[in-house]
Image (tube, helix red, strand yellow):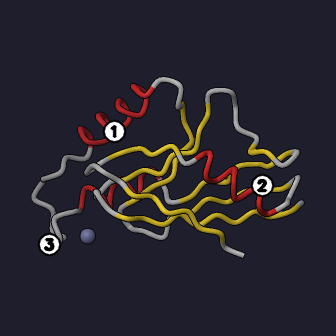
Amino acid sequence: MIRQLRVQTKSRTELVDITQGVQRLVTESGIRSGVCYVYVPHTTSGITVNENTDPNVGRDILKELNKVIPFDDQYSHNEGNSAAHIKSTLVGVSKAVMVEEGRLALGTWQAIFYCEFDGPRDRRVFVKVMKD
Ligand code: ZN
């Protein structure tokens, strides 16, 4: 069964901490031990796991991604969002997080982020929780 989160982004590029929403879906699944698979069904989005304590970490990640992959670089794709497609491929569209005792087994400083690369948009995140 695929569970879903909705994410409404506000900026062109943005990291949104979705950890609590994912944990809610893990709790609703009733699964105590297994793997939680988080996936975005979009071509200009990503999923990453990183620090949420200092919001500057996310800002720096976006700043450097935007530097390495500029918004405009004479791209061939005529939709005007090639940079977003490239960032999606680099970051990846999914992450697997282990579940133990009904909780996401994240490190102290870790959180799950939805990565917006072509916002603002209304997005979906698919979550599947699999039992051991
Ligand atoms: Zn496009």
Residue placed at 70% from the left, 37% from the top?
A: 106
Say if 84 sits above or below 49 in the image.
below
Front residue (pair 20, 113): 20
Residue annotated with mark 3 = 78
Sequence order check: which comes first, mark 1 or mark 3? 1
Sequence order check: which comes first, mark 1 or mark 2? 2
User: What is the three-letter code of the residue carrying label 1?
Assistant: Leu
User: What is the three-letter code of the residue carrying label 3?
Assistant: Asn
Neighbour tally class for label 1: few under 14, some 14-19, many 20 plus, Cα within 10 Å: some
Labels in figure, total: 3
Left or right, residue 10 beside residue 26: left
Left or right, residue 23 beside residue 87: right
The nearer-to-camera label among 1 and 2 is 2
Neighbour tally class for label 2: few under 14, some 14-19, many 20 plus, Cα within 10 Å: some
Rounded to the nearest whole Å, what is the CA distance between mark 1 and mark 3?
23 Å
Residue placed at 57% from the left, 44% from the top?
A: 112
Q: Write down the quadrant of residue 122 in the picture.
A: bottom left
Give x and y (percent) for residue 104: 74, 45
Residue placed at 51% from the left, 52% from the top?
A: 47
User: What is the three-letter code of the residue carrying label 2?
Assistant: Thr
The answer as to whether callout 1 falls within 8 Å of ligand 1 is no
Q: Write down the quadrant of residue 94 in the picture.
A: bottom right
Residue annotated with mark 2 = 27
Helix, strand or loop for disc 2: helix
Say if 74 sits above or below 11 in the image.
below
Residue placed at 30% from the left, 51% from the top?
A: 10
The extreme bottom residue here reads 1
The answer as to whether callout 2 falls within 8 Å of ligand 1 is no
The nearer-to-camera label among 2 and 3 is 2
Helix, strand or loop for disc 1: helix
Helix, strand or loop for disc 3: loop
Residue annotated with mark 1 = 62
